[in-house]
Image: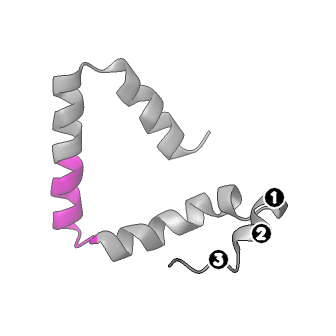
């Protein structure tokens, strides 16, 4: 199980007000460590590569948004 999956599992157990505190804290950590959306997407790409890099999704490799 990945850390993201573990965190998600733990978040599901918490009441909504505490989940909001966790989200706020994540925002604080992003600012503290200079993580912006571009850096976050780059960091996520490695962990998501096994999800997106598979034979079934090869049809989307040449997709060009309109």
Q: Are marks 1 and 2 in contact (CB under 8 Å)?
A: yes
The residues tagged by marks 3 and 2 sit, at their Cα atoms, a distance apart of 8 Å
Q: Residue 16 has which mark? A: none
Residue 29 covered by magenta stretch:
yes
State the extent of the magenta-drawn residues as a range: 25-36
Q: Residue 40's x, y, as percent? A: 37, 67
**Foreground residue among 46 and 33:** 46
Q: Would you place residue 10 above or below residue 63 in this image?
A: above
The answer to which image quadrant residue 61 occupies is bottom right
Name the residue tied to disc 2.
Answer: 59
Q: Would you place residue 66 above or below residue 56 in this image?
A: below
Q: Earlier in the sequence, mark 1 or mark 3?
A: 1
Of tags 1 and 2, the one toward the viewer is: 2
**Foreground residue among 28 and 65:** 65
Q: Are marks 1 and 3 in contact (CB under 8 Å)?
A: no
The answer to which image quadrant residue 55 occupies is bottom right
């Amino acid at each position: 199980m990945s850390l993201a999956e573990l965190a998600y599992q733990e978040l599901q157990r918490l009441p909504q007000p505490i989940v909001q505190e966790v989200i706020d804290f994540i925002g604080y950590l992003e600012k503290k460590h200079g993580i912006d959306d571009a850096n976050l997407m780059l960091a996520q790409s490695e962990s998501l590569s096994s999800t997106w890099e598979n034979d079934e999704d090869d049809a989307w490799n040449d997709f060009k948004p309109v």
